[in-house]
Amino acid sequence: MPVFVYSGRTAGSKTVSGEIEARDKQEAMGKLRQRRVVVSEVRAKPRDLAVGGMRRRVGVKDLKIFARLFGTMVNAGLPIDMCLQILVEQTKNKTFAKTIADVHNGVTGGASLSDALSRHKRVFDNLFVNMVAAGEAGGALAMVFQRLATYLEKADALSRKVKGAMIYPAVIASVATGATIFMLLKVIPVFAKMFHDLGAELPGPTRFVMALSNVLQRTFLPGLAVLIVAGFIFRRWHRTEQGKRTVDKLLLKAPVLGSVIRKTAIARFTRTLGVLISSGVPILSALDITAKTSGNVVIQTAIEKVRRSISEGKNITVPLAESGVFPSMVVQLVAVGEQTGRLAEMLGKIADFYDEEVDAAVSAMTSLIEPVVIVLMGGVIGGLLVSMYLPMFDMIGAIK
């Protein structure tokens, strides 16, 4: 959405300026009038001429620091506008500093903190904004920001565990594939020419590898083009609802990896829902936000069914059990939390348990994948080398 730069005065004759998102200039002026700002100037913001890749994105680390510092300063009694001004000066990420500065302008212009944050959806998601809104309504803003910081730290740690477990096997597999292609394209043809000049009779494995090398040399560039096109088509298809659903179903059913994905999604679901409920967000809104942050379409659909059932007057445990996605242990613990009135606390305990389960599952997956990848890499490259040396062994035996 286009961004407009404005300046004007509030009802108290205080000069304000800042940025606002709107479809056009008239809508921007209408939004400012709703904030009771007497507009003196509104103009379209010039586009930043930033070189691609030079502008830093706002990461989880930036948000963690922002939430932790903001909560600490609010708890110390500092006004919100002063907290934001201090964070603008202390934030090293220039992109994030500009965002905080615009939030500061919105707050000083009369908007609530949650409204000012909601104008930057690429930085502050629905979970962040709704928790802040609940904190403002309940007068517990400092506590909400501390919970947000803790949530972001734990969610980031969980994400890094899963990604870190996949890096080593991915690197090994990439190196093995690259080495195999290099040998077939560059090394094997040298041996093939030498054997052809000698006129020696070649064993079966050597003939097979040489034939494979010939095929790869003729089809490498067309094959690479086909792979790129296929990857592009798959990416476009994966962006569709049907594509996401199909891939996510397959991932959940995948051996070893499926268990890690399911446990990660359950940990994220229980952690997010527990934090939102404990911060005062209504359960229907909390489930709506949790569904959108689940990371898997199948689990998102299950959470949405839970939300619809609750809106019809049912309790949370019945639709959870009927979804078939959540283990019976999770359903039973949620039922206990609901009956005792300690649902948020129980969800937090479930999340802690599944964090440990993810650790164990990731370790098991890594210990299984690493030796398999190494054996495959050694088998393929070793097989290529042995197939090329077999004729030499035959020739040496014949000479003797």
Image (tube, rainbow, N blue to C red):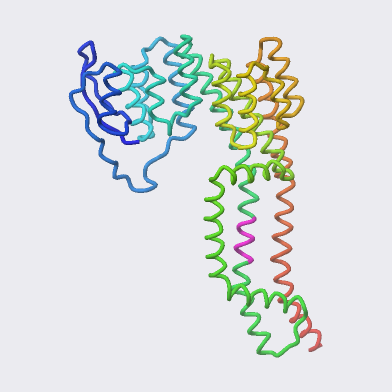
User: Viewer-proximal residue, 182 or 136?
Assistant: 136
What residue is shown at x 64% (from left), y 45% (from top)? 246
Q: Main secondary structure of the magenta part?
A: helix
Determine the residue positioned at 59% across, 68% down.
182
Q: Position of residue 387 (x, y in %)?
A: 73, 74
For the record, the magenta segment spans 173-180
Residue 255 figure quarter: top right
Q: Is residue 89 visible?
A: no
Is residue 135 found left or right of 2 in the rendered image?
right
Q: Residue furthest front?
A: 312
The location of residue 261, given as percent across then percent down, is 66, 38
Q: Is residue 303 visible?
A: yes
Q: Quarter of the image containing the C terminus?
A: bottom right
Is residue 97 one of those drawn in magenta? Answer: no
Where residue 89 appears, x then y in whole percent? 33, 26
At a point 65% along the width and 80% down the height, the residue shown is 191
Which residue is outermost to the left?
Answer: 40
- Vertical placement of 243 versus 387: above or below? above
Quadrant containing the N terminus in the rendered view? top left
Which of these two is toward me, 55 or 45? 45
Residue closest to the eye, 8 or 29: 29
Placement of 203 over or under 375, stated as above or below: below
Q: Quadrant of residue 94?
A: top left
